[in-house]
Image: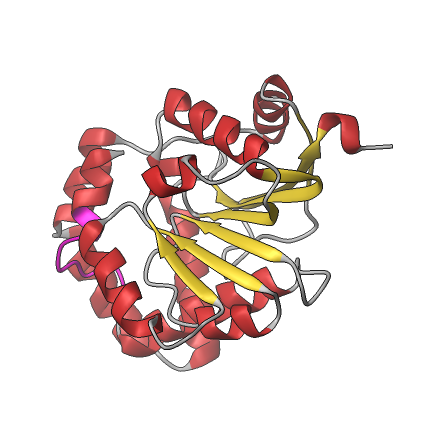
């Protein structure tokens, strides 16, 4: 995961335009809010990225913890949300030290593809410790083995056409093809899981999980899973 952390801490061109970036994070915030069931819940966004609309998420819950491994991104989060008393910014190391049974909802969106299977197991162990017995883990934007980059491109272009930045998206795709992102993706690769494999992986870490009806974000060809403590399910 270190290579990807370094990439996202750099000046990258993964978004086609400011409009693309803003819509991306706005949609994610909306979908996260959909999983919050009470105004007093503690929510942890694990490897949150820029989280531009985190304030909207914070309005829907009691406390929002933004956990981000990239130091530069984390610094921007601290500066952006310092006045907001309902938002805390933490490193992943800080998260590992948090009290047991202290979180109601953990969201890991567009994260698992950048982690080795061993790193993901360790993250699941940390999350299981943090979640209250009634808590939920939501894992979004999971890449499927049978769905490749062409469908990611199609999903982006469809999203861009719907929201008025198609030209920027086409230029952005060309830039991405020539960028460090494409080279890093080819060299390091991205982890992909079938529905059965992800459910089985979660079961080995003490979770009972099901696939959600729709994915977090704009790409319907990726998957989202909702997991609970195995003993908490009836």
Based on the picture, tell me whether residue 126 belongs to the magenta stretch: no
Say how the picture is coloured. Answer: secondary structure
As drawn, is 174 to the left or to the right of 120? left
Between residue 26 and residue 61, name the one nearer to us. 61
As drawn, is 77 to the left or to the right of 146? left
Up-down: is 74 above or below 126?
below
As drawn, is 190 to the left or to the right of 177? right
The residue depicted at 13 percent of the width and 60 percent of the height is 11
The residue depicted at 61 percent of the width and 31 percent of the height is 195
Q: Is residue 36 visible?
A: yes
As drawn, is 14 to the left or to the right of 130? left
Residue 197 in the image: state x and y as whole percent: 57, 23
Residue 186 in the image: state x and y as whole percent: 21, 34
The residue depicted at 52 percent of the width and 39 percent of the height is 99
Q: Residue furthest front?
A: 99
Q: Is residue 16 visible?
A: no
Q: Main secondary structure of the magenta part?
A: loop
Q: Which image quarter is the N terminus in?
A: top left
Q: Residue furthest bottom?
A: 164
Start and end of the magenta stretch? 7-15
The residue depicted at 20 percent of the width and 55 percent of the height is 176
């Amino acid at each position: 995961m270190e290579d990807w952390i370094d990439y996202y801490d750099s000046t990258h061109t993964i978004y086609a335009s400011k409009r693309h970036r803003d819509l991306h994070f706005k949609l994610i915030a909306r979908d996260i809010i959909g999983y919050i069931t009470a105004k007093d819940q503690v929510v942890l966004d694990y490897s949150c990225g820029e989280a531009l609309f985190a304030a909207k998420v914070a309005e829907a819950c009691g406390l929002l913890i933004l956990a981000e491994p990239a130091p530069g991104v984390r610094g921007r989060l601290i500066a952006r949300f310092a006045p907001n008393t309902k938002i805390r910014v933490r490193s992943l190391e800080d998260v590992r030290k948090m009290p047991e049974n202290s979180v109601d909802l953990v969201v890991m969106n567009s994260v698992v593809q950048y982690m080795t299977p061993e790193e993901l197991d360790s993250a699941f162990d940390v999350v299981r410790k943090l979640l209250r017995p009634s808590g939920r883990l939501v894992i979004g934007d999971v890449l499927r083995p049978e769905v490749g980059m062409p469908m990611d491109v199609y999903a982006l272009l469809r999203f861009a056409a719907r929201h008025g930045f198609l030209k920027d998206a086409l230029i952005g795709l060309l830039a991405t093809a020539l960028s460090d992102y494409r080279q890093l993706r080819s060299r390091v690769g991205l982890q992909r899981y079938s529905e059965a494999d992800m459910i089985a992986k979660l079961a080995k870490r003490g979770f009972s999980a099901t696939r959600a009806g729709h994915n977090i974000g704009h790409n319907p060809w990726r998957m989202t899973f909702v997991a609970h403590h195995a003993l908490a399910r009836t």
